[in-house]
Image (cartoon, rainbow, N blue to C red):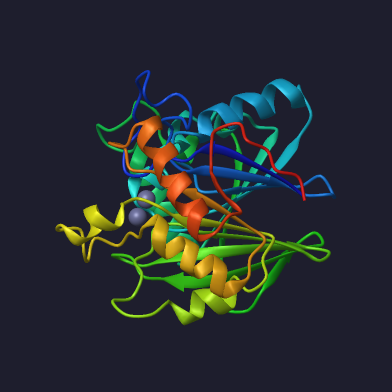
Amino acid sequence: MKLEFWGVRGTTPVSGKDKNKYGGYTLCTSVFTSEGEWLIIDAGTGLKKLGDCLLSQGGEEPLNLHILLTHFHLDHIIGIPFFTPLYSPKITLNFYATCSPEETEKYLSGLMTGRYFPLDFKKTPSIKTYNEIPEEDFHIGKTRISHCPLHHPQGNVGFKIQEDNKQIVYATDTEHPEKGLDKRLVSFAQEADILIYDAMYTPEEYESGRRGWGHSTWLEGTKIAREARVRELYLSHFNPDHSDEQIDEIIALACEKFPQTQGAREEVKPVL
Ligand SMILES: [Zn+2]
Ligand SMILES: [Zn+2]
């Protein structure tokens, strides 16, 4: 499996010379499986660049893409209207979410209706399927997909992508419990090769008025990583106000607690 980060910023896209190292696009991550399937987790503004790359590499070939949506907050879906594969009749977009197919279509098309956008989502030329994620694990080719509910306003899920004996766990947009760890997430991430976790706040920021906002800290990420005995921790969903320098400091502090910590960065491509 090849993992690739296309957007690692939470809440809103940002730009500026102090944001270039980690990047300013909102959440979008891809996993390219050994069978050649594209799994895309979240569709924030990072999705645009992924779409452009896929079309430039694929030429005129039909392409089947699988888009796993964790939830429908704007930072996780706002890339969809600007995703060039949406406008190609040779592309099939298979959307997966934990709500009914009708609701998924309604939320996505809501981005491109009325006065919000000049084109109608439902009339775009790509072929689309909407899939409600079942309670139990499901497969895309040989790749097994599991999900885990997280603590976030209006609900959210984390995903686990497993191929052969390799596992990637994606868990952004989650708030840690007041005491102890989220046991369900610890068990879900047990011995994963890579855990991607929500590092929206520093512990100090969290304690000064961010409790109940549905996000976590780098410190909680290191605790989960240690308890779950994951191989590598990638912090992500970075605060739009944090500069590269601040994120570097966060990663350095996190490494003191859990040495195999890295910052997710656009264009970083770990291969498992
Ligand atoms: Zn978010
Ligand atoms: Zn959210």
Q: Residue at x 55, y 33 (%)?
A: 266
Q: Quadrant of residue 193?
A: bottom right
> Horizontal and vertical percent for residue 231?
67, 61
Using residue 143 as the reference point, say whether residue 171 is left or right of it. left
- Name above or below for residue 144 compared with residue 72: below
Q: Residue at x 76, y 22 (%)?
A: 59
- Is residue 220 visible from the viewing direction of this image? yes
Q: Quadrant of ligand 2?
A: bottom left
In this view of the protein, which residue sits in the foreground, 123 or 264? 264
> Horizontal and vertical percent for residue 202?
31, 52
Q: Which residue lies furthest to the left in this view?
A: 209
In this view of the protein, which residue sits in the foreground, 196 or 261? 261
Q: Which residue is drawn at 62% across and 29% down?
A: 88
- Name above or below for residue 16 compared with residue 5: above
> Horizontal and vertical percent for residue 73?
34, 51
- Name above or below for residue 125 compared with residue 93: above
